[in-house]
Image (cartoon, rainbow, N blue to C red):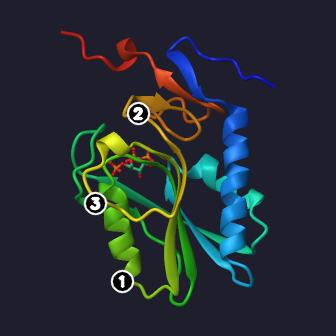
Amino acid sequence: MTADVPKEIEKVIISEQEIAAKVAELAKQVDADYVGKEILLVGVLKGAVMFMADFARALRTPVSMEFMAVSSYGSSTSSSGVVRILKDLDRDIVDKHVVVVEDVIDSGLTLSWLLKNMGSRQPASIEVVALLRKPDAARVDVPVKYVGFDIPSDFVVGYGLDYAERYRDLPFVGLLRPEVYAVRP
Ligand code: PRP
């Protein structure tokens, strides 16, 4: 099935089918690395919701799921590295094999902070799976073991990614037309 593409989307960058294939591939890699273990998936709200739901169902390894919501200070489109916890984990992660699930790594500042924060809570191990990464936007080097797609630093939305809280529900990742977010004089 091919989804309708709203007029605000210039073009589809990653189709629904390509996402599904990549989710299955990432899950296979993770399954192979965690044989005999259980995984605690930690989804970073809100962007990771779609990916988390599909990824958890693609895994064969037993998982439990937790969510964290953070907000970075700074403009709504760029991260500052100063992070505030809006919703913390519901339980401790001591001795758990944690896999942090992110929709996109942009500057890397959010993830860098999260890894430091969660790393201090004595998990057995901690790794990251990110569907998308924008290498050109990286401001810090973050160790990410599982990456779906490296993409250019363009304004993309869909499959969890928003502009002003819209477009998260699109089943594909698409390029947003600049006139949608351009500031008018
Ligand atoms: C996005 C994304 C990451 C972060 C990446 O979240 O989900 O958490 O930005 O940016 P960084 O690498 O530059 O730190 P956002 O703050 O937009 O919140 P949302 O998931 O609720 O949309």
Marker disc for residue 120: 1
Q: Identify the residue at image location x=36%, y=62%.
A: 142
Q: Height in image: 109 above or below 125?
A: above
Q: Secondary structure at mark 2?
A: loop
Point out the image quarter for the C terminus: top left
- Residue 144: which quarter of the image? bottom left
Residue count near mark 3 (Cα–Cα under 10 Å), binned few <14, some 14–19, many ≥20: some
Q: Which is nearer the N-term, disc 1 or disc 2?
A: 1
Q: Amino acid at mark 3?
A: Val
Q: In the rendered structure, are the residues bearing label 1 and label 2 in contact, judged by CB atoms less than 8 Å apart?
A: no
Residue count near mark 2 (Cα–Cα under 10 Å), binned few <14, some 14–19, many ≥20: few
Return the residue at label 2: 152
Q: In the rendered structure, are the residues bearing label 3 and label 2 in contact, judged by CB atoms less than 8 Å apart?
A: no
Q: Whole-Å distance between the Cαs marked 3 and 2?
A: 24 Å
Q: Is mark 3 within 8 Å of ligand 1?
A: no
Is residue 156 visible to the viewer in this orientation of the structure? Answer: yes
Q: Position of residue 59 (x, y in %)?
A: 74, 63
Q: Amino acid at mark 1?
A: Ser
Return the residue at label 3: 83
Q: Position of residue 35 (x, y in %)?
A: 73, 79
Question: Could you tell whether 43 is left or right of 37 in the image?
Answer: left
Q: Secondary structure at mark 3?
A: strand
Q: Which is nearer the N-term, disc 3 or disc 2?
A: 3
Q: Whole-Å distance between the Cαs marked 1 and 3?
A: 16 Å
Q: Position of residue 143 (x, y in %)?
A: 40, 65
